[in-house]
Amino acid sequence: MFDCHYDLLTYIWMKKEDKKFLKDYCDKVYHVNNITGGIFNLFYMSKEEMREEIGITEEQINVVENLKEVKEYIEENRLISDNIKYIFGIEGMDYLERIEDIDVLYSFGLRSTNIVWNHENKFGGGSKARENYGLTELGKELIEKLIKKGIAIDLSHANEKTFWDIVQICKKYQEKGENPVVFASHSNAKAICDVPRNLTDEQILAIKELNGVIGIVSIKKFCVNTDDICNPNIDYEQEYIKHINYVRNLLGGVDYIAVATDDMRYYYMEPEYYQNANVYKHEEIRDKLIRSLKKNNYKDDEIEKILTINFTEKILKKI
């Protein structure tokens, strides 16, 4: 299974003093549990959130140095074996100092980025930014740089204005015969669960037009619109499958569907909420999801497309 969104790089950054723990952790997730690839992200919040929620201080934040350090740490400690097909991503470009630094980040393995996280930054508006805050002029420059560099543009977390501004630029490049790489790594269907992070039908169709994929994410509050994530009367697994069913029906098949965990159980300094935040825990998603899809009459070839092939063919081979 290919996991379209997992913030492993931030976890390594946080836990780098405990080499044995990280080695055991990566072995368990990526060998024992058959997660054979993924987008591994550094994610950035506000300076206050970074400090208070995950214990990273303002002085430690430097996008270029952070990615370089984590890359070297992974290689020196052989945390991830060669048979795991992964790429590096950055979630939230708030601290990118110069657009020219994209070249350096690319040399370290950056192949995917969300230019915004929840709030607005100098490039555009995130999912919680005001509605009319779209791409800034600097943001448009960054998108063009990413397209020319062949880095995938992740539309999850963008508000609608930023989303459509990015799509407009990508379509212009597509009309010129180029192939911008665009996808949403961890977003569900807004028609089922109306929260800012999820996608409207029009957005899902636009991603298809750009030959991207939608990574249906197993976070409960993006599957069903409730704050009660431990309600025994809700079948969260079936609520998750409803999103896959909906996108399949909207797009006429499974060819643009992928999956993402975004499992945050181990990141936050007070993790109680996150123990139950996901429909599937990282270490169990593959087997349970296969069982759920078969129960919902998905064929083996459709399941393989959803779990691995779609992302590999539409995104991974292009970047």
Image: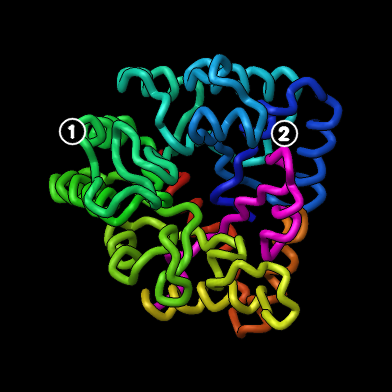
**112 relative to 176 in the view: left or right:** right
From this viewpoint, is residue 247 visible? yes
**9 relative to 21 in the view: left or right:** left
From this viewpoint, is residue 314 visible? no
Q: Which of marks 1 and 2 is nearer the N terminus?
A: 2
Residue 304: % across, % down: 59, 65
Location of the N terminus (image quadrant):
bottom right
**Which of the pair 30/313 is nearer the observer?**
30
Location of the C terminus (image quadrant):
top left
Q: In which quarter of the image is residue 241?
A: bottom right
**Residue under label 1:** 137
Reply yes or no: does residue 260 show up in magenta.
Answer: yes
Residue at position x 69%, y 40% from top?
A: 267
In this rendering, the answer to whether 114 lies above or below 186 is above
Reply yes or no: does residue 143 show up in magenta.
Answer: no
Residue 174: % across, % down: 20, 49
Mark 1 vs mark 2: in front = 1
Magenta residues span: 252-280
**Which of the pair 273/296 is nearer the observer?**
273
**Residue under label 2:** 81
Instruction: Describe the colour scheme in one phrase.
Output: rainbow
Type of amino acid under label 2:
Ser
Disc 1 secondary structure class: helix
Q: Is the magenta stretch mostly helix, strand or loop?
A: loop
Question: In this figure, what is the number of numbered marks?
Answer: 2
Residue 266: % across, % down: 74, 43
Q: In which quarter of the image is residue 205?
A: bottom left
Disc 2 secondary structure class: loop
